[in-house]
Amino acid sequence: MDLTSLNNSLRLITPEIILSIFLVIVVVVDLILKSNKKVIPYLAVLGFAVTGIVVISSLDSSGFAFITASTSSKQFGMFAHDPLGGFFKLLILSVSIFIVLFTITSSEIKQIHLRSGEFYALMYGMVLGMMVLVSAVDLILIYVALELLSLSSYVLAGFTKLRDRNSEAALKYMIYGVVSSGLMLFGISIVYGLTGTTNLYLINSLLQGPQINILTLLFAVLLIMAGVGFKISAVPFHFWTPDVYEGAPITITAYLSVASKAAGFALLIRVIQIGFVSFVGSDGFWNLIPVFDWKALLVLLSVLTMTLGNLSALWQNNLKRMLAYSSIAHAGYLILALATLSTQGVVAVLIYFIFYALMNLGAFYIVMIIADRTGSEDIDDYDGLGYTSSFLGVSLIILLVSLVGLPPTAGFIGKLYLFIAVLDAEMYVVAVIAVLNTVVSLYYYLRVLKHMYLTKASDSTQSVRASGGEKIILLLLVVPTLLFGIYFQPIVDFTKSCITVLGV
């Protein structure tokens, strides 16, 4: 690699470099400040904000970093800087800022304030892994980024050590993660053995030749899907989700439910579109290389994921577990949009993720506030909450209605574009299944509202009051959830401008 190429590569990974610099700064500041760690979360927010500004300034640019492969007409690198990667990076950084704000008011994080520097350093490592993952187009770099993300998240899941369930969550998360990573690496090795390369673009060109063993490729793809399915909590790779979500600190649970899932979907989109699409038709539908039936696999995963997630959520009394199964169900809806194998489907995924981030983070934040005051996450402790704490009650109503997908909330717009993509692909039977699942989800969300407004509070029920800072953070999530349910065109236009995948 010559100096010019190296400079170009470094320019394209500027956000990742800035993030790495702030990671080092957080560690150094933590070492200098022995006992007063209050400045560290604000420093973390600053790092994410600066990185986000750099990402926004480079949204219109594109190119490959670290050129490792070439064809007769093009050169390809391990890292693709394009609008799709920029979208997911912005989403991940925005969610990260909210999570840091959550930690400032979280009683769980306050109890480990002497170790908060390590907490935010691990969080930076997790974000760095996600940002590399959403732009990686080489299977080796994908695996390295996935491991960086995973190793940081394993530690964060059990970081507080305040209860036995924290360590249990971390251990279960690590065991499932190690198995899925091993399966994925085995699949990558098989693909390399078949094609002689790990670059997705070169794999695409080689798959179009007659020499590929289809059965071996099928086995390899299924193994790789184990790693991706683990990150997006798709059935049957979802087993870790409810236990880890319940046992981890609520801030980390919220983070895993949105940011980690977003990185996993970005990876899935790239693997399919770059590795298996021969060309995109004028109607926006992808024409796949006839070596693997991605549509059948994705539809099957979608139906199983949304159905199991919704049915399992019906009898959950712990709000974190209920939202965990809800998160699994939403992963099913997102997989369904991707199963259309179309540009419209990708647009639906991006729109859905923006709104899902708002409503899911808001719901988890309210659960965190109530748990901090009452010490409980049980649904019975929400009895009469709508009257004793009207602000939290009304906010939770809006967020849960949005999670169902009812108007006039942002969740309705997300579901609307998802169903438009599905119907445009003429997938009518699956659309009916998705509608029925939405009806099922209405029950367990309304169950929370029943406890808040129709069940009388007992004498032991504690009154919950949110502080001024907590109300501001919550309004930053609730107001857009309502606003984008009415005026959503800017979001749609933005997502349509971000669907470009480099080299496709």
Image (cartoon, rainbow, N blue to C red):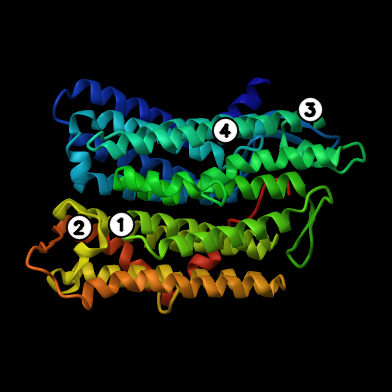
The mark that comes first in sequence, 4 or 1, is 4
Q: Which residue is mark 3?
A: 193
Task: Tell me if residue 427 can be seen.
Answer: yes
Mark 3: which amino acid? Gly
Secondary structure at badge 3 equals helix
Tell me residue 408's x, y (percent).
Answer: 40, 79
CA–CA distance in space, label 3 to label 1: 47 Å
CA–CA distance in space, label 1 to label 2: 13 Å
Q: Left of 351 or right of it: where is 226?
A: right
Residue nearest the observer in this picture, 325 or 257: 325
Residue shown at 62% from the left, 56% from the top: 301
Secondary structure at badge 1 equals loop
The mark that comes first in sequence, 3 or 2, is 3
* Farthest-out residue, right: 210
Circle 3 residues within 10 Å: few <14, some 14–19, many ≥20? few
Q: Which residue is mark 4?
A: 181
* Farthest-out residue, left: 459
The mark that comes first in sequence, 2 or 4, is 4
Task: Tell me if residue 488 can be seen.
Answer: no
Q: Left of 220 or right of it: where is 149?
A: left
Q: Which residue is mark 1?
A: 318
Establish if 358 lies above or below 229. Answer: below
CA–CA distance in space, label 4 to label 3: 18 Å
The mark that comes first in sequence, 4 or 3, is 4
Q: Mark number for residue 370?
A: 2
Residue shown at 87% from the left, 37% from the top: 212
The mark that comes first in sequence, 3 or 1, is 3
Circle 2 residues within 10 Å: few <14, some 14–19, many ≥20? many
